[in-house]
Image: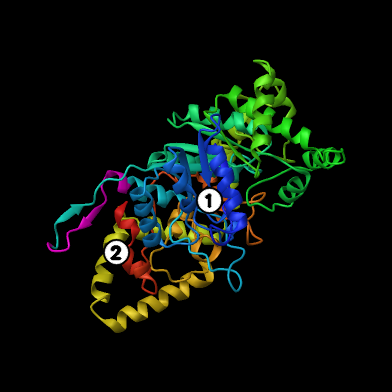
Amino acid sequence: MVEVETSRGLAMEEAARKESDFARRLSEFEEVDVVALTDNPGGNPHIRPEVLGQDLLYRGREVIINVSCKDYNRNGVESRLWALGSTGFRNILALSGDYPIGGYAGQAQPVFDIDSAGLLKMISDMNAGMPVKAWRSVGREARLAQTELFPGCAVNPFKLVEGELMTQYMKLELKVETGAKWAVTQIGYDSRKLDELIRYVRLKNLDIPLIGSVFILTAPAAGFFNRWGIPGVAVNNELLAIARKQAEADDRGRAFFTELAAKQIAVLRGLGYRGVYLSGRPRLARLRKVLEIERSFGENDWKDFAAELNFVQEGEFYYLQQGENAGLSSDEINPEYLASIEPGARRRKRLGLPLSFRAGKFIHDHLFDQNSRGFKIGKAMYTGIEKSGKLSSMAHTLEQLAKEPMYSCRDCGDCSLPDIAYLCPESQCVKNQRNGPCGGTKAGYCEVLDKECIWLRAYDRLKPLGQERDMLKRPIVFKDASLRGTSAWANTFMGRDHHSDD
């Protein structure tokens, strides 16, 4: 697969024509099976990928359309999916998307009404025949025609700290369960993590083909990645130094970086990945050279390349033990990780759990859990309270007085505090991720805010209780925007929020 980045402006302008011509030439290159088209990459406004992709479809080529959730609410996303399905596009890469950084008259307001997991759920429902209420017969359910979309997802195994990596793996499991048919990795330069990911997929019996990303590097790109210029992409200082040294050559390192990409492809092939997703705006002659070099390698050369392409971040966490080859993994789970989940180790960590988490969990378990005795009492109370507008208003005010200082509540009315270890996605996640982390964190920190990712924090809160692997084993959460400004407590007791679907 080769990625083609769309451009800003009319399709007949020079920049867009160059990309269109390149995509057309790619479609005639028999060693390229699929052309992948980006969706406002980096958070910038670009022409829609389907404009460029339509010509490729006419030529009988496979096209992947990247669909992200940053620019459309769920109605806009659904409308776009119907349009894609109606015009012959099948392959969809479901992404949450990069946080917007530019646009007309300043930075755009991100949407993130749903996330990549929610997008996969929507596609699965559309493929099954989306249920709708029949317009002329209230109460009778009808179904729309089935689509034939073939959705994929992204996964980022190149994470530094435990909670950051494990939640990526857990979210991949959720995505596969929700309907992802294939997965592509983020860009990375650590062969051991690539090996670990494919072993993890086999260990968890996830029936999904993996595709590895290979970005044809340059020295400027290495410096940009080293500064976390692309969310979720890391180049360590060692690789940066090598890239800058190679850039001093007469060809500015072109031959070195071409061979580096070929070695990455060889490693992916050796590990058992089903394909390669090439990016970095390569020209056709460069692609031919990369593939020519890769074909020249011996059958087992990839093992030496794996040891070579092992650019580890300092202090990086691995779920599996290192193999005999320094650039490969084994099937043995990291003994330090195993020690950390022993009952005694978990108990010692419980002493450091914050009061807001303890209080929230105690109240939820004894009052808001639908199987608790307190839930029945609360439901009876709110049944009476809701008969009076004045009482309802007073109860809502008291609720906010309790929740705002403790959880920075934004009064969304459809509360996900119990889903994320009593951390509010409305106030503490710029992408409002309710179904696991995005892939853009940098060393455990949000790609936008100077604070730890709430999903990493949730993992660290739940691990002492032995519940960290359970937080994404649940139905996909869709926030109901109609509940904003209403009592989340009342909505839970009266079955109006997403918890009633559990």
Q: Identify the secondary structure beneath mark 1.
A: loop
Q: Is residue 218 left or right of residue 406?
A: right
Image coordinates of residue 372 in percent, x first then y, are 31, 55
Residue labelled with disc 2: 496
Image coordinates of residue 448 in percent, x first then y, are 63, 60
In the rendered structure, find residue 241 and report the number of the disc placed on it: none
The part of the chain drawn in magenta is 125-137
The answer to which image quadrant residue 486 occupies is bottom left
Image coordinates of residue 316 in percent, x first then y, are 69, 39
Q: CA distance from mark 2 to mark 1?
A: 26 Å
The answer to which image quadrant residue 315 occupies is top right
Q: Is residue 284 left or right of residue 61?
A: right
> Which residue type carries mark 2?
Arg
Residue 479 visible to the viewer? no
Q: Quadrant of the N terminus?
A: top right
The answer to which image quadrant residue 483 occupies is bottom left
Q: Residue at x 31, y 48 (%)?
A: 126
* Vertical order, 494 against 331 (above or below): below
In the rendered structure, find residue 437 and report the number of the disc placed on it: 1
Q: How many marks?
A: 2
Q: Are marks 2 and 1 in contact (CB under 8 Å)?
A: no
Q: Residue at x 69, y 18 (%)?
A: 301
> Which residue type carries mark 1?
Pro
Task: Name the foreground residue: 375 vs 393.
Answer: 393
Query: Per the image, is 136 magenta?
Result: yes
Image coordinates of residue 100 in percent, x first then y, are 58, 62
Residue 314 visible to the viewer? yes
* Vertical order, 194 against 143 (above or below): above
Task: Name the foreground residue: 400 vs 443.
Answer: 443
